[in-house]
Amino acid sequence: MKLNLIFFKKIFLLLLLSLSISMFGQAKPKVLILATGGTIAGAAKTGVQSGYTSGQVTIDAMVNAVPDAMKLADIKGEQIANVGSQDMSFEIMMKVANKINELASSKDVDGFVITHGTDTMEETAYFLNLVVKTDKPVVLVGSMRPSTAISADGPLNLYNAIAVAADPKAKGHGVLLVMNDWIHSAQALTKVSTTAVQTFMSPIRGLIGTTSYGINDFYHYPDQKYGKTSEFDVKGVTAFPRVDIIYADADMKADLIDASIEKGAKGIVIAGVGNGNMNKESLDACARASKKGIIVVRSSRVATGIVGRNVECNDDELGLIASYGLNPQKSRILLTVALLKPRKLDELQKIFLEY
């Protein structure tokens, strides 16, 4: 009798919920905005000047500037940091990652939006893509013009980012970036202009989709590992190994590589010329570093293309890693996370191929 009573109570509650939805409309998705600062939260003295100060506007003020976003979702905001993205740190990235992982299975959140400056946005996006453990939409958004500009791009970018985070079709795509009507994968995007509003491109793998005034169209899924398929777990991590990026050029000096090692680097990424190349002096220095247990990754300073293994450099002989499709800054993020535990060279090379 008691079990029957419980059963009928559940049926009654389900009928009541169904009636409420039919009378008042379907419950809106719940989106949590994690604010870190950047130009989208920036302010200037006038609306027509290029100079401004990042991280001046709170998340509540940004959301209030886009009242129509409340029609898309039930929105809550949390200020994680308020810095220009040139001051982004692993500490702040970890705060964001831990918050997302903490709420990954919560019914109180259907999607996440992270407001962020554009300068290092691709690094934070890629870091989160490696370490967050959820299929729920995780969307980074920023702007190229401060909130006080005559034609600020932040409000519409934020509106579209909320629309993507609230969209069930965005699930399982890994970490996304939404700006200027385009939906990028964290794996593919890179910043290509210092000032243009269309600053982000995905030159090798292309866009995930588009968004226009909250209407989303998804083209494809990323084909690399990310999210729940990622092997990386940073729970409890408080410090990361030092990994430096060294820019290659004509007549490059190898002492920069030696100096990096002396300062305690556990890994070095070379932003090489062409297909991840460098002169013989520097290649010899990289080989010496590898023999000391320092991991050296060859990436490229060139905007697009794949850095192949054993193409113009004998990676097997020198003990080097080829970055494949990752640019120097993303190579640094991946190597930093991968070196949280000891790994052999062949294992690291496989990681760069898979991620």
Image (cartoon, grey):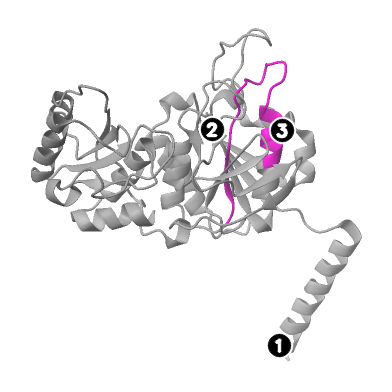
Which residue, as the protein is rendered here, is positioned at the far right?
23
Quadrant for residue 225, please give it: bottom left
The residue located at (70%, 30%) in the rendering is 155
* 130 lies above or below 212: below
Residue 160 drawn at (x, y percent):
70, 40
Q: Is residue 38 left or right of residue 321?
A: right
- The answer to which of marks 3 and 2 sits earlier in the sequence is 2
- The answer to which of marks 2 and 1 sits earlier in the sequence is 1
Q: Which residue is mark 2?
A: 116
Residue 31 drawn at (x, y percent):
65, 47
Disc 2 packing (10 Å; few <14; some 14–19; many ≥20)? many
Task: Name the residue type under label 2.
Answer: His
Q: Nearer the viewer, residue 77 or 123?
A: 123
Camera-nearest label, 3 or 2: 3
* Marks 3/1: CA–CA distance: 54 Å
The answer, for residue 304, to whether it is visible in the render is yes
Residue 90 drawn at (x, y percent):
37, 37
Q: Which residue is mark 1?
A: 2
The residue located at (71%, 87%) in the rendering is 2
Residue interval drawn in magenta? 136-160
* Marks 2/1: CA–CA distance: 54 Å
The answer, for residue 240, to whether it is visible in the render is no
Disc 3 packing (10 Å; few <14; some 14–19; many ≥20)? many
Task: Name the residue type under label 1.
Answer: Lys
Q: Is residue 136 left or right of residue 213?
A: left
Let me know if residue 68 is in the magenta part.
no
Q: Which residue is mark 3?
A: 156
